[in-house]
Amino acid sequence: MAQERTFRHCSIIIQLYAIYEFFAEACIAFWLARLPRYQSFSELSAQFKNTYRYGLGRIIQDIDKRRYRNLSLPVVLEKYLHSLRDDPPWELVNEALTFHATNLRRADLEKLFGSAGIDGVWHSLETHDLLRAQLIEADWNNSLEQMILDLVTFRNDASHGTPDEILGLEILYEWITFVKGFCDALADVVTHRIVKAEASHLPESVLGVVTETLHGNIVIATCNHGLIRVGDGFYFLREANCTLAEIESIQVNDVDQEAIQVDQAGVEIGLRTSKKVGLNSRLVLVEN
C-alpha cells in the first residue's frame, strides 16, 4: 500500500509539473508565432534580438541533440536570414527563446517570458482575479511564488522516487486544481498581451469602443468601421484585461439586425454579449 501511494504521488506530481512547464513554453511559442504580424525584426528591441541570437547559437551548436530533433540547420538559418532582411513573411525559431536549463521557479518564469518580450507576467498572475479567488477558496496560506516553489520541490523529490512527503488524494486533487487555475490565468495574461499588440500595431482591428453599459450584458458601442454579425466573437480590451465575448444580438436605431457593415465613423450600435464587458472596452477583431 505504501509503495502504491508513493507511485501515485510521484506520477501525479511529475505530470503536473510537466503540464505547467509545457504550458508556459506553449504560451510563449504562441506569442512568438504572432509577433511577426505586428513588427518587423529590425523594430524589435536590441535585448530581444541579442537573446534570440544567443539562443540560435545554442541551437546550431546542439542541432544533433534530441531536444532539437524537429529542427534542421538549413531551416533555422533560412528563418534567421529572412528576419535579418525583414523579408515578409518572416518567422522566429521559437526554441531559441523557450529553452531553459532550470526548473521554472518564479524568477526563471519571469526571465523566460521577459526574454520573449512579455514583461510583468508575474504581477499580472498575482493580480489575476480568478487565480486569487482560487487560492483564497482553497485556503492556501502560501503566496503564489511559494506555491510554484513547492511544486518544483515536490517534482524534484518525486523524480528520484523517494519523496520525503507523500500527498494524499485530497491534497493531490487540490494541486491539480491549482495547476489548472494557474495555466488558465497564464493563458489570459498572454491573450491580453496579444490583443493589446493587435490593437496597437494593427489599428484597423479596433472596430469601436463601449461607451455605455446596461443590464443583461447589453452595451452601446460607438463604431467606426468593420463588419459585426450575430454569432461573431470579439475581444473587449481594457488596459488591465480583455474578455472574449460572442455577439448575441444587434440593434441599430431600435431595430434588430443580424449584421451591420459600418462604413463611417461614430455609428452607435446596441449589442448584447455572451459575457459582461467593461465600460470603455475597445472592440477588437483578432484574425487567426
Image: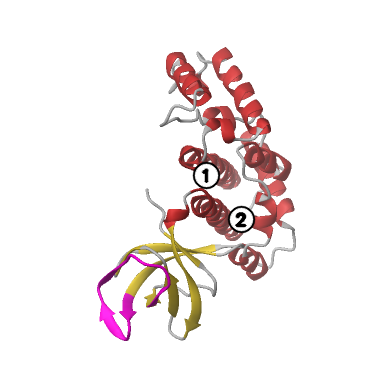
The segment highlighted magenta reads 249-269
Residue 165 shows up from this direction: no
* Secondary element at image label 2: loop
Report the residue that reaches farthest toward the left.
258
* Residue at x-position 41% and y-position 66%: 224
Mark 1 or 2: in front is 1
Question: As rendered, which of 174 and 163 lies closer to the eye?
Answer: 174
Residue 3's spot in the image, x, y percent? 58, 42
In the image, is residue 263 part of the stretch drawn in magenta? yes
Residue type at mark 1 is: Cys
* Secondary element at image label 1: helix
Colour option used: secondary structure
Sequence-first disc among 1 and 2: 1
Question: As rendered, which of 208 and 162 lies closer to the eye?
Answer: 208
For disc 2, the neighbor class at 10 Å (few under 14, some 14 to 19, many from 20) is few
The residue pinned by badge 2 equals 168
Residue type at mark 2 is: Gly
Task: Confirm or deny contact between disc 1 and disc 2 (CB under 8 A).
Answer: no
Residue 60 shows up from this direction: yes
* Residue at x-position 59% and y-position 55%: 182
The residue pinned by badge 1 equals 27
